[in-house]
Amino acid sequence: MRKAWAPLTLVVLLCLALAGLPAPAVGQQPRIGITVSAWFIPPANDLLKEIVAEWARQKGVVAEVEFVSEGDLVPKFTTAAEAGAGPDIIQVASLHAHLYADKLVDVTDIVGPLESKYGPIAEIARDAAMVRGRWRAVPWYATPQVLTYREDLLREIGEPVPDTWEDALRVGRKLKAKGVPWGEALGHCPVDCVTTVYSILWAHGAREVEKDGKTIALKSPETVKALEFIKRAYDEAWPPGVVGWDNASNNRAFLGSQLGLTTNAATIWFAARRQAPGIFPSINHAPIPRGPAGRAIPFWPTSLAVFQHSKNAALARDLVRYITDGPQFLRWLEKTEGAGGSALLGITKLEKGRDPKLKTVPEVIQYGRLPGWPGPPTRESAEVHAKFVLVDMAQNVVKGMPIPQAIDQALAEMKRIYGQR
């Protein structure tokens, strides 16, 4: 997960200078706030501020930047949307473009030209930010999970990089015998643990609901096969205790040379440069494994939205356009040192300077899916995700509950959430 990032909130106060007239007093100047998650890499944060200041100079405005913690992002969005006051521009988190679509400005005319120049747009970004055929947020960047592995250990056991989940299990058995196992989080954590369960379920063809987003489809042979795989992996390849792991557990274990294979954002690689220089040269990345039904990864893409309560919506829209446009985005992406990518998939072809060991990061964005897939994102699918219904199902299986009973228990909770009997 992005636990190594230090996401921040960037509030930009823009003060319009009236053409041909003396600048008004500070208290009389228009104010525009933009709340975004910035990166833990200082040069990326610095460049984002420069990009905003650059735009401000072009428009004849003044920009001031303020940072606050990650924990304020979602409450700030909710409070601003419900109160009709607060920042003009905000980073979209979770399903907020859908939950508060009527509070957000239509930005279809901004996304259209971006897609024409740098598309196609990843399916996950379209699902997250397009509501009833209209864009309510502009795709910005994404930080998907990837398979993180030790090249030296794979050479020692004579195995290639796993491409399928069965490959990962075979490799994992050998790594466990060597004392540096494959490990996946299976506790109550919103990113890594969800990635483990959802990726394996989807890869085996299991689904929560049908494409209509309403018909519950969890009870299926595909779900049984996915849970059987998770049980085998837990018994044969994963280290004990993964049911208690949080988002940071696999990071610590990998950096401590206690894991040789795991799924994570690229943060382990960045942390190893400083914390584990002995293993850093051998760390590499690959797509999360595929299964009989293909490859799919749960994560949230990042986009920017303009609130309808903005008193300076034209300026706010123009700033969003400027930040997300190719020239500015590519400059900023370079400063993130390759840890992220763009939901505008054509951007990848224009990018320069990415470390070869991070080339997988933008490539896997195309496999991103939102909870509830293949159905559209809904409040119900978000609740199933937030309450760890499917994670608990997998936990119950590895703890010894019969698979049919574990599915029935999850099914009962899903029916309650979806209002079905």
Image: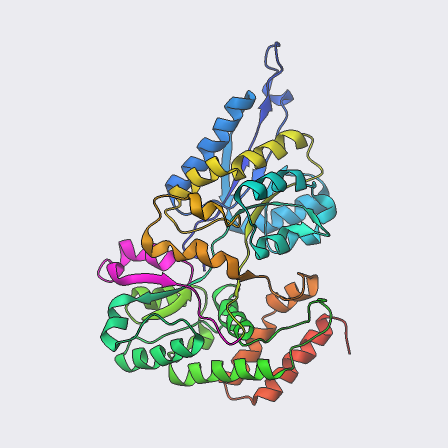
Q: Residue at x 53, y 84 (%)?
A: 397
Percent from the top left, x then y, of residue 197?
52, 73
Q: Quadrant of the C terminus?
A: bottom right
Percent from the top left, x then y, of residue 45?
43, 40
Q: Residue at x 47, y 54 (%)?
A: 143
Tell whether 113 sits left or right of 168: right
Q: Quadrant of the N terminus?
A: bottom left
Question: Is residue 2 something one can see in this rendering?
Answer: no
- Compared with 263, 365 (above or below) is above
Q: Is residue 387 magenta?
A: no
Question: Is residue 289 something one can see in this rendering?
Answer: yes
Tell whether 246 sits left or right of 78: left
Tell whether 95 sits left or right of 401: right
Residue 403: image quadrant is bottom right
Q: Is residue 288 magenta?
A: yes
- Magenta range is 264-292
Percent from the top left, x then y, of residue 5?
43, 52
Residue closest to the eye, 121 or 261? 121
- Compared with 202, 104 (above or below) is above
Q: Residue at x 35, y 78 (%)?
A: 172
